[in-house]
Amino acid sequence: MTYIPHTDADREAMLKAIGVASLDDLFDAVPADLRFPTLDLPAGLSEMETAWELGGLASANAAANDFAIFLGAGAYNHFIPSVVNHILLRGEFYTAYTPYQPELSQGTLQAIFEYQSMMCALTGMEAANASHYDGATSLAEAVIVANAHFRGKRTKIILSPGINPQYRAVVRTYHQGNELKFVGDKGSATVPDLVDMLDDDTALLVVSYPNFFGQIDDLGELAKSVHDAGALLCMVVDPIALGLFKSPGQLGADIVVGEGQPLGIPMSFGGPYLGFFATREKLVRKIAGRIVGETVDADGRRAYVMTLRPREQDIRREKATSNICTNQGLMALAACVYMSVMGKHGLRRAAELCYHKAHYAARQIDALEGYSVDMSKPFFKEFVVTCPEPVAAINDVLLEHWGIIGGYDLSRDYSARENQMLLAVTEMNTKDEIDTLVEALRSAPDDIQNHAHHHHHS
């Protein structure tokens, strides 16, 4: 059943207006033999059969709630209070797109305003937008801001190798047509090495806090060095870590970006996610995305308005700061609800649980024969384990024998890091799960050897 609003008379009038005799005549350009090709499709299914079919496909996935998961590397299994979904599912919110008409969009605008305010409090910045596709996109936009700030006069962007490799790949793809030079991340540069690369052609220096390996680098003097060179400092951050550690604002950052997925958004097999972006007031005219402000209406009542929208959809394309900025409003709303129900103390509690559980796991694993954990720097919820066998082989054993989703294989992105696994532990991992993981890692080398031996003989 399709509902078609036009009457025959309506259609008649429209066809007459465009000077065509019938609807079929509109398709004259398509060769007759191509108009209705025979499609080799199976017979249709009922709703019930379709549900079975889809359920069967879905159950082939290794989903986080069916397994113990120790995989992070950019997407994290954090607790989501049930209220988050209840708010998202309200009809007022889940149909909301860009709030073009403020008088009809006060609820959406207020939610965005609250989200921005909490993001500023969390990062220690003065302005935040709402919002980008994901953390990688946000970082690429930070480079655009730096380039605009120096009007293209400075062309060097220093990237730390401790930034998520996928983020760095997206940044390079974004800017391949520009005159920018990206340096710093092709080797194993430390923070002092990155500082040595600063010069008067540097627009932006970017570090990750914590870094991709879960570690907290000493960034105390970094901002001064960057600012002395006349450049801007950007930090890629884990928002949960900010519940516990010094804010990027306190550390002197100019731009703070990252992935908002940990803030009440499920992992969802990779998206949709939420790229957050916060900055100091001096850069606010250069940023992409939208900023909502609080004002008063004609009757003196509190009202919310879009104060800045530098997107090609809203203004002339050549004047736009960015041509990629879909609202992600629902994701920003999820983060807004999460932060408001968790509050400052709840966020700190979640961060503390991550910290303590990760350190408990790291100590147990470091004590295992053949394994060692990199404890050279403070770490938050992720840490690097050097393993006695290839990570892929260990992960196969963990999944098949123990129902555990193991860590990230760092050799995929860092050729010097063979047999190194990046493990993530969050508040969602129970002590039992961690103890089981330790047991599984202890027996994994033997399982792999026996498996190989068995195959050799057959």
Image (cartoon, rainbow, N blue to C red):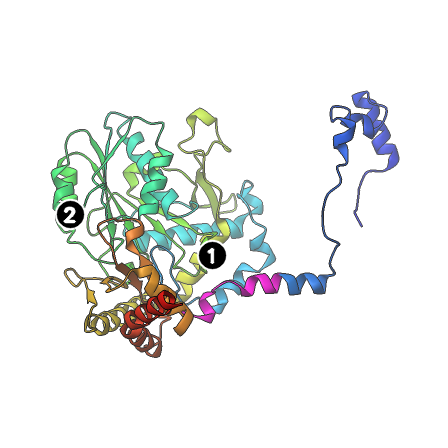
Quick one: SS at disc 2? loop
Q: In this view of the protein, can residue 127 be seen by the observer?
A: no
Tell me: 266 left or right of 21. Answer: left
Asked whether residue 197 is drawn in magenta, I would say: no
| Image coordinates for residue 188, horizontal then vertical, percent | 18, 46
Upstream in the sequence, badge 1 or badge 2? 2
Residue 387 image-quadrant placement? bottom left
Q: Residue pushed farthest right?
A: 9
Quadrant containing the C terminus in the rendered view: bottom left
Within 10 Å of disc 2 (Cα), the crowding (few <14, some 14-19, many 20+) is: some
Q: Amino acid at mark 1?
A: Phe
| Image coordinates for residue 41, horizontal then vertical, percent | 72, 48
Quick one: SS at disc 1? helix
Q: In this view of the protein, can residue 347 be seen by the observer?
A: yes
Q: Amino acid at mark 2?
A: Thr
Which mark, by number, is residue 190? 2
Q: Residue pushed farthest top?
A: 19
Tell me: 161 left or right of 55. Answer: left
In-front residue for pair 187/352: 187
Q: Which residue is mark 1?
A: 269
Relative vertical location of residue 428 with respect to residue 102 in this rendering, above or below: below
State which region is magenta: 54-70
Which mark, by number, is residue 97? none
